[in-house]
Image (spheres, rainbow, N blue to C red):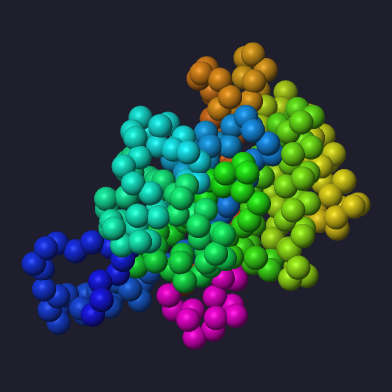
């Protein structure tokens, strides 16, 4: 039996019948994996900081893995330097335990090289993500921090299979970049599209957050035939800055809003895969 490349086993350990039976029972009880890519409407929108907070809020309730396509920004937020990259795992040079960065219940995988290569090859589909279900601690939610320059989505969310979260701010440049992102999402030739949820970061209040959302959604609906959904807003800081765009600590209202968004993810219809779905590959990533 070939060892799963996503996992490492203790040296010299032999799997006997009891181990295999226990492993089978554990496998059959595993939940499905849900996948949420997070995109930014341009630079300096606080996307990485937002994703980190969402992951930290979700981790106590779900087994969360974050794939980070940035240049190590999220590892630095945790106060550590990335030791390796997803590419080292995919090439077999390292196992999961030597690639992952842990912070409490949260697991972070630096993935700038590995995820970029997977997306370029069109290989970030169900089979890749099923690897996270084969871990000793199976993941139930993968959050993907897509680089601002990345134009491709993981194959698991193609064809209208799931949702993406798009972060924007009230700044005109950010709104323009967010619309360009939505337009690229609409270029999927499959005829169906993933749902786009828009989170407005740095709005003065709910009314402004909804106004920014309506400006984007009305334009997307009229010119692209895409109907985004409002994911909420994060209130601006004391200096008017969006969350994650300054060294100031977030206001309590902003932390509360982030917690509410994190809790709502449980009801979103995300792209999904499971080990038990192999007999029905057409539906393996649908909720």
The quadrant of the rendering that contains the C terminus is bottom right
Q: Is residue 72 above or below residue 284?
A: above
Question: Which of these two is toward me, 83 or 48?
Answer: 83
Q: Residue at x 61, y 48 (%)?
A: 150
Q: Quadrant of residue 280?
A: bottom right
Q: Is residue 5 above or below residue 104?
A: below
Question: Which of these two is toward me, 125 or 265?
Answer: 125
Query: Residue 212, how many percent across, how many down?
Result: 79, 35
Q: Answer whether residue 286 is magenta in the image.
A: yes
Q: Is residue 58 above or below residue 79?
A: below
Q: Residue furthest bottom?
A: 279
**Secondary structure that dominates the magenta span:** helix
The answer to whether 110 appears left or right of 42 in the picture is left
Question: Which of these two is toward me, 60 or 133?
Answer: 133
Question: Which of these two is toward me, 4 or 142?
Answer: 4
Query: Residue 209, how many percent across, how many down?
Result: 75, 33
The answer to whether 67 appears left or right of 43 in the picture is left
For the magenta stretch, what is the residue range?
Answer: 275-287
Is residue 276 at all visible to an observer of this figure?
A: yes
Q: Residue furthest right?
A: 222
Q: Residue at x 29, y 58 (%)?
A: 93
Q: Answer whether residue 240 is magenta in the image.
A: no
Is residue 264 at all visible to an observer of this figure?
A: no
Q: Residue at x 52, y 17 (%)?
A: 248
How many numbered discs, if any? 0
Q: Quadrant of residue 198?
A: top right
Q: Residue furthest top?
A: 239
The quadrant of the rendering that contains the N terminus is bottom left
Query: Residue 118, how many percent across, how many down?
Result: 51, 60
Query: Residue 273, how many percent across, how many down?
Result: 50, 69
Q: Residue at x 56, y 71 (%)?
A: 285
């Amino acid at each position: 039996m070939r060892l799963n490349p996503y996992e490492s086993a203790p040296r010299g350990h032999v799997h006997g019948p009891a181990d295999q039976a226990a492993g089978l029972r554990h496998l059959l009880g595993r939940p499905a994996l849900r996948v949420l890519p997070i995109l930014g409407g341009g630079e300096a929108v606080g996307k990485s900081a937002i994703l980190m907070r969402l992951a930290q809020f979700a981790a106590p309730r779900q087994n969360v893995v974050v794939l980070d396509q940035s240049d190590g920004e999220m590892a630095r937020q945790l106060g550590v330097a990335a030791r390796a990259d997803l590419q080292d795992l995919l090439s077999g040079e390292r196992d999961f335990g030597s690639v992952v960065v842990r912070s409490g219940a949260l697991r972070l995988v630096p993935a700038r090289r590995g995820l970029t290569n997977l997306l370029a090859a069109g290989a970030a589909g169900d089979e890749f993500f099923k690897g996270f279900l084969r871990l000793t601690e199976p993941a139930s939610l993968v959050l993907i921090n897509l680089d601002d320059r990345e134009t491709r989505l993981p194959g698991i969310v193609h064809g209208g299979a799931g949702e993406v979260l798009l972060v924007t701010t009230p700044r005109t440049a950010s709104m323009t970049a967010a619309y360009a992102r939505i337009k690229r999402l609409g270029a999927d030739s499959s005829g169906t599209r993933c749902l786009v949820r828009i989170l407005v970061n740095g709005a003065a209040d709910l009314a402004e957050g909804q106004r920014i959302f309506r400006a984007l959604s009305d334009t997307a609906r009229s010119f692209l035939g895409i109907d985004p959904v409002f994911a909420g807003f994060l209130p601006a800081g004391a200096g008017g800055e969006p969350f994650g765009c300054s060294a100031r600590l977030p206001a309590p209202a902003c932390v509360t809003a982030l917690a509410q968004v994190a809790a709502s993810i449980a009801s979103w219809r995300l792209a999904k895969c499971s080990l038990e779905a192999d007999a029905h590959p057409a539906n393996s990533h649908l909720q």
